[in-house]
Image (cartoon, grey):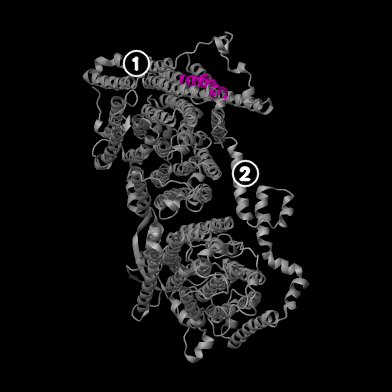
Amino acid sequence: MQPLLAQTAQAIAASAGQAVAHGAGGGHGAAEGPIVAVAPTVEATSLLAVVILLPLLGAALNGFLGKRLGTQGVNLVGCGTVALSALLSWKLVLDLVQLSGPGHAAGGNFGLHQNLFPWIHVGSFQADFALWLDPLAAVMLLVVTNVGFLIHLYSIGYMKGDPGYARFFAYLNLFLFSMLCLVLGDNLLVLFLGWEGVGLCSYLLIGFWFEDRANARAGKKAFVTNRVGDFGFALGMMMLFAVFGTLEPQAINQALAVPQGSLPATVPLWTLEAAALLLFVGACGKSAQIPLYIWLPDAMAGPTPVSALIHAATMVTAGVYMVARLNGVFFHAEFACYVVIVVGASTALLAATIGLVQNDIKKVLAYSTVSQLGFMFVAMGAGAWAVGVFHLMTHAFFKACLFLGSGSVILAMHHEQDMRFYGGLKRFMPTTHWTFLFATLAIAGIFPFAGFFSKDEILWNAIASQRGGTLIYAVVLLAAFCTAFYMFRILWMTFWGEHRGVPEGHGHDHGAESADDDHHHHAHGDPQESPWTMTVPLMVLGVLSLVGGFLGVPAVLGGHFGFPNLLHDWLHPVFQYSTVALDPTMAHNHAMEYGLMALSLGVAGLSIFLTWLLWGGGKDALRDIFAEKSPWLHDLLWNKWYVDELYESVLLKPLVFVSREVLWRIVDEVIIDGLVNGVASFCKQAADKMGRAQDGDVGNYATIMVAGMVVLLLVIVGFGVGT
Amino acid sequence: MSAQYLPVLFAFMGAIGFMAVMLGLNHLLGPKPKAALTPAVKFEPFECGVPALQRDNRRRISVKYYLVAILFVMFDLEAVLLYPWAVLYRELGLFGLVELVVFLISLVVGLIYAWRKGALEWQ
Amino acid sequence: MPLDHLLIVAFVLFVVGAAGVMVRRNLIVVLMSIELMLNAVNLAFVSFSRQMVDHDGQVMVLMIFVVAAVEVAIGMAILVNMYRQKRSLSVDVFHSMRG
Amino acid sequence: MPTDLHFSLMIPELVVLGSAVLVLLLDAVLHGGGPRPGEEDPRDTTLALSVVGCVVAAAWIPAVLWNIEGPRSSFNGLFVADRFSLFFKLVVLVGAALSLLLSDSWLRRRRLSSGAAHALVLFATSGMMYMVSAGDMVTLFLGLEVMSIPVYCLAALLRWEDRSVEAGVKYLVLGAFATAIMLFGFALLYGYQGLVGGVATTQLEPLQTTLMANAEALPLYARAGGLLVLIGLLFKISAAPFHMWTPDVYEGAPLPFVAFMSVAVKATAAAVLLRVFGGPLLAVLGLDGMLWVVAAFTMVVGNFMALVQDNVKRMLAYSSIAHGGYILVGVLAGSAEAQAGVLYYALAYTVGNVAAFAVLVYLSRQGHEAERFSDLQGLGARHPLVGGVMVLAMLSLTGIPPLVGFFGKFVIFKAAVAQGYVGLTILALLTSAVSFAYYLRPVIALFMRPTVGCEVAVIPVNRRVALCMGLTSLAICALGVFSESYLGWLSSAVLALAG
């Protein structure tokens, strides 16, 4: 299979009659003369399928036999399969490391490949159900299985006593299966299968407590929004197939392993641009970018482990991963990359500003996720694929830790999510506090926590890349400022200061969640630390938030001590032909790099200092100044820039009513999910119109048939006259 | 050759089109009585030219009558298929005879079914 | 008799039958209208068949005869059931399913 | 004594007809004059006989006829048993056998004499088999009627229920109307063949040859004839605007037989469409433009109307209209690949739809039909396997990758794009995205809504329906996963059509 791909790719490259230059070193390669892009080294394995199928097995067992297995059985099946899967993935990655050793990979990409069965062979179209593990997939694989395992473990404590316990684990396992298909798929069709699968699981899990209508509605909103994106993705996939005749990212990247601007004649640039834009629409849906991000905050209706696993660590990064997977396409599609970087930067800032004023702890984290995904897309748009993947990885650590920490707090506070009722929890739950602090320092970008390295590289690339610029840098820096602010705001409001507690008579209006209260193992009273199944994952993730960054120490810092940038070296074979070079004036300007690093640290420090002023210094009055002095700004942020309302009015209403009601609706805050309702009511009205003909009258049915017949007759007579 | 039939087609479409227009106009302009308010005269058998009989004058016919009538229509008309056979039976010879017997047997099966199900009993 | 004239009669019969199906409310009359359409078809087949001195068309006519009878028989059977239930043979009683 | 008689080609049909007659006789002999006390229940006998008849006939096709040497047409071209028709016979037989399995318990619960129902299914099946094998207007018409008339009866089977009788009347009246229209088209084409082709005949192949040979100067009446025939077939495949009967009939007709009519009638109509209008003939007649319009309209109407239904049967009816639209896309594309896609789609739709109906039959119980979405609420939690079958069926009908439904759509859409129908394909993609919304509704009702009323009895295990569900689920997965070898098989069937 694989040699055939290489042939296809080289045939495309050769058809332009051009030598393929070595693109890794920017301009240096060209001087060394023509070097043909090295074909990937492939080794067969049979374990990849096992990694994928274990969670599926778990899902089947828990789904169908969950009631009979009992809690322990469900735990064993749910966590056991994932644990095995995680262990196997370590073994596979070690195999892969062996493969990268001398004598094996001759400079090209390398990976393990398994062809499960031939899938569709129709005419010229060939797609096998095949799996492919290369360095890029390996990073994702480890993150998905290991963080996934930790979150499964955590769920044992969090979901204890829930009536849908087995169902929850079945969904979670099914999600992991789909996510692994997405990560390991050797062609875009398998990837798409996983893509749809994770969407479905996300929908099922958001609406997990479906007895509450709001939750079910949030699930629906996520689903509909994602369909918009999926449509773009499917179209983009078709375009790629039309151009390359294959859907395998390896073959496509190989065919595109030429310097920018010297595309073979068979691949017109505009098709790449269009395909990249369409794919990015798909990525926007899945990874919650402007304009399709609106579903993610609502998705917090699901249980907190779900928010951690799906809506922070793994699924939402699928869009980033897909862009990295198809780096060749985005490498050449320069305009599409500008769109990506602009959208990414705007999303990062917009979501971060909204996060500043939210009071629901999970909502803040949700907007933070949207914002951090924006950071990743900035890296992608700048063509620094490895940097984006690096941030993806560190983000998976610290954001999972934050969500799990918030879950721990929520559980201790009996499903109260409003931070105004928290405070002083450090005393009651030290483990949660310390891990949360670590993760917060990481996301705020404080040296030497993980986020410092990854975020800083993004900032550097935002200004130094040929596709970046000062404006982008400024926007992203501002977003980083907001990040540190809202994160420390959480810390102050939740863990530090005085414990405020939930006042008497404050109803639990969190629907089904409160209904589960009597299942929880602790009585009302002082908040208590969570059980070990929950704190152990927190500790592991907390430690990872601290040390995870050392996998990608930038050259300016580590180079002097001979400390390599491990992640970049590891990913180099994947991205070597497509990494966008830095601006030559910046590339070796170490002074500037140090300066910017200090600037971002300073900004974060300033931000933290501000939060201390507002919450730590006991100056409560200061806090209100903001709301009083510029109420419009506060309202704007509090209402999330009115984006939901904007969609409601600009996109939906014209479809349904074209009337002055539009203006009235903008101020109508009641209808938050107008997107779902609007589309639905449009369809309903259209169907009602059509359904009116369906009045049950045989005579009318016959008349409609004849009318159709006459119209069609006239049509062909018309054609007849024309020809 | 083809032009010969063009007027026919146009006549066809003209007829349908005229009808559609009239029906459409009727639908648009005419009053729309509810089903219950439709004058009873609409349901009268005016085609035969005889004024409708009084309702209580109409004798009720046993539903068995319809059943027999239906069976009769079917068995009677299947006999139509015997005509071409009768015209050609010399040429078809034994093969034709066998074919016909098969055909008749299938009719007989229908008859047996009707008989066993009680369709032939008047009571 | 020229083919054209026969075909025109067939067309007219067919359209009249179709109109009957569309506008008549009594289901018996509707069934009769369908028979009219089938007879129009028969006339067309026979006319062509006669013009071309061919038997295939006539075979078709025989088949249509028989099948039409069967259809009517089944239709009558169903209509009897309908009359038993609704005491009416009008199309207008059919409004239980719509939309 | 006429020559060219190959009865061996007709063995599957003869088996089905023979078992139909036997079932009828058995029913009459054992069950004549209404049930008597102490009498043996003939249902098991007639059911076994009917299913065995279908299975034997179906087994005969791959075992013997598929690779048969020698002539593949018989009775002077009236009957064609090429691989193309054999494939559709298989689909029809599978649909019939599965629906028979479904119908048993359903009829039993209503204390209905099922012998007649089983015989009707078998007669209709034989009609379909003749129809897909038709090489002549006469066999086509006879097959059509032998298929349709028993199906009208099946729709009106519950003769004391308002809606069933209503369904029967509507189906009969509109069906006969459509048949008359189609026959008029045949008359015109017959005349054309005689007047222009020189040799008057009702056979289809000479007619197609004549039409192709005179492609440059086709008279309007020939094209109108083609259109009328097409409309008759579009009615059977329930394409808009000739679809109006479908929702009412499906809603009123007895549940297990709706499964039969929806899958088998549609597959048959698709086969005949391909046989009569396959390849370039559509464009020659100038009907490709109008079929484009009809396919688009059908997909839009079917999918949108399905969105707003409360009745699961009615929703499935509209969705079946939508699937008819996708099949039409394949017919329109017309390439060998597209035709293979239509074949694939026919089987994909059959197994998916029968699985869905099987779940409905399973969940129906005394005094509680599983008809509305609300009737399904909360049953998934109690019967996860049954609910799982529904999920599988719905995902397959939507077209989610590893399942058979996806490949059906995929092959058809790909072929349509290759033939330049990009706009239509985009519309098809958009509408199938819409279909997600309504196909999820039964799943949501089953799993994500609380049970209405807490006295829901546990539904006893029904082995026959369970068997049906198991087989269809297996087929949904297996045909999807191993689609490659299966598609190769289909290509040979399509080659038969071309050569």
Q: Secondary structure beneath disc 2?
A: helix
* Type of amino acid at the residue the image marks with label 2: Gln
- SS at badge 1: helix
Residue A92 x, y percent position in the rendering: 36, 73
For the C terminus of chain D, the quadrant is top left
Q: In the image, which is nearer the foreground, mark 2 or mark 1?
A: 2
Towards the viewer: A662 or D290: A662
Mark 2 = which residue? A685
Q: As displayed, is residue A472 above or below residue A586?
A: above
Question: Could you tell me residue D128's position as x and y percent?
Answer: 37, 33
Q: Residues within 10 Å of mark 2 (few under 14, many from 20)?
A: some
Of residues A396 and D196, the one nearer the viewer is: A396
**Outermost residue toward the bottom?**
A561
Report the amino acid beneath label 1. Answer: Ala
**Are labels 2 and 1 on one chain?**
no
Spatial CA distance of label 2 from label 1 is 55 Å
Q: Quadrant of residue D214?
A: top left
Does the CB distance between marks 2 and 1 fall below 8 Å? no
Residue A443: give its label: none
Name the residue that disc number 1 marks: B79
- State yes or no: residue C29 in magenta: yes
Q: Is residue D359 above or below residue A254?
A: above
Quadrant where the N terminus of chain D sits is top left
Q: In the image, which residues are magenta? A: C13-39
The residue lying furthest to the right in this view is A629
> Would you say A95 lies left or right of A153 here?
left
* Nearest the eye: B80 or A649: A649
* Mark 1 burial class by Cα count in 10 Å: few <14, some 14-19, many 20+: few
